[in-house]
Amino acid sequence: MIRVRLQGASSPIEIPKLNNLNTTPATLTTLFFREDKPVRTVTFEPGGVPYFFLDDICEAAGWHAFSSGRVDSNYFPSFGKRTAEGVGEDGAPFAATVLSPTGVFYFTDLVDPGKGQRVAAWAKREARALCPDHPKNDPAMFLTLVWNDRLPPRPYKFSGYRSEWCALKDAHTRAVITGRGIEALRCGDENDWATRWKTEEDAAWDKVIATLSAAKAGVN
């Protein structure tokens, strides 16, 4: 078990290491997307990447909990999520999916990139403030090429990732032109997530999420 202290709690909470790996110190804390939108985070080593609780991200974005199923999509990268299991303050066991900063970006892009871009930007800002010197090759914190050197989805204007994505694309373009030629670059562009990830099944899923989120907004 890992000893974890929740911000403001009088006693530690015990949870196992994510995915039942080795035991290292972990810390639970709460950040605020807005005053009425708390988002719990967990880090698993001093100065480590903060992971955001998926349920709280959905609530902050105003999405129905059903939308959390998007993290099970084939297009959601493995480095974007982990699973936390443990025992809460009330003694009850819990299991929660937590997202890395880039995991929040991929998740919001899969559900509704327009509506979710400000949540993605907020998660990025909080993470970078907590880990200002984090290695830039960590895909949990920074955008990197995925799935056989494909670019991530093109970020929306206010997602906080547009300049980072453009720099990644420029570097990728130079590498492709230098190493494999213009034709390879043209083929690589066809692999851009933004032009290929939607399928009929995805579209049906989007319709269900939109309906449930609209109903939730009406209730609130």
Image (tube, grey):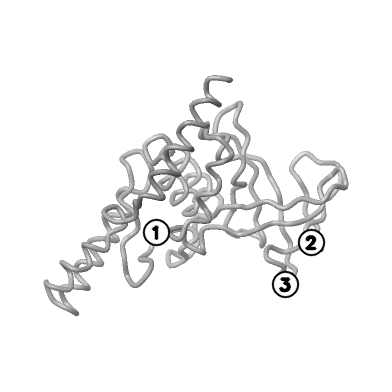
Q: Which residue is mark 2?
A: 2
Q: Position of residue 152 (x, y in %)?
A: 35, 58
Secondary structure of the residue carrying numbered label 1: loop
Q: Quadrant of the N terminus?
A: bottom right
Q: Position of residue 168 (x, y in %)?
A: 29, 61
Q: N-terminal of the two: label 1 or label 2? A: 2
Q: N-terminal of the two: label 1 or label 3? A: 3
Q: Position of residue 87 (x, y in %)?
A: 82, 52
Secondary structure of the residue carrying numbered label 2: strand
78 to the left or right of 204: right
Residue at 11 percent of width and 72 percent of height: 182
Secondary structure of the residue carrying numbered label 3: loop
Residue type pointed to by label 2? Ile
State the mark number for residue 39: none
- Vertically, is 61 above or below 123? above
Query: Tag 3: Cα neighbours inside 10 Å, few (<14), some, or many (≥20)?
Result: few
Q: Position of residue 93 (x, y in %)?
A: 81, 51
State which quadrant residue 169 falls in: bottom left
Residue at 52 percent of width and 34 percent of height: 63
151 to the left or right of 137: left
Calculate the distance from the C-alpha at mark 1 to the C-alpha at mark 2.
30 Å
Q: Which residue is mark 1?
A: 143
> Mark 1 touching mark 2, by CB under 8 A?
no
State the mark number for residue 22: 3
Q: N-terminal of the two: label 3 or label 2? A: 2
Q: Which of these two is toward me, 78 or 37?
A: 78
Residue occupying the far left of the picture:
182
Q: Which of these two is toward me, 175 or 69?
A: 69
- Vertically, is 28 above or below 59? below
Q: Quadrant of the C terminus?
A: top right
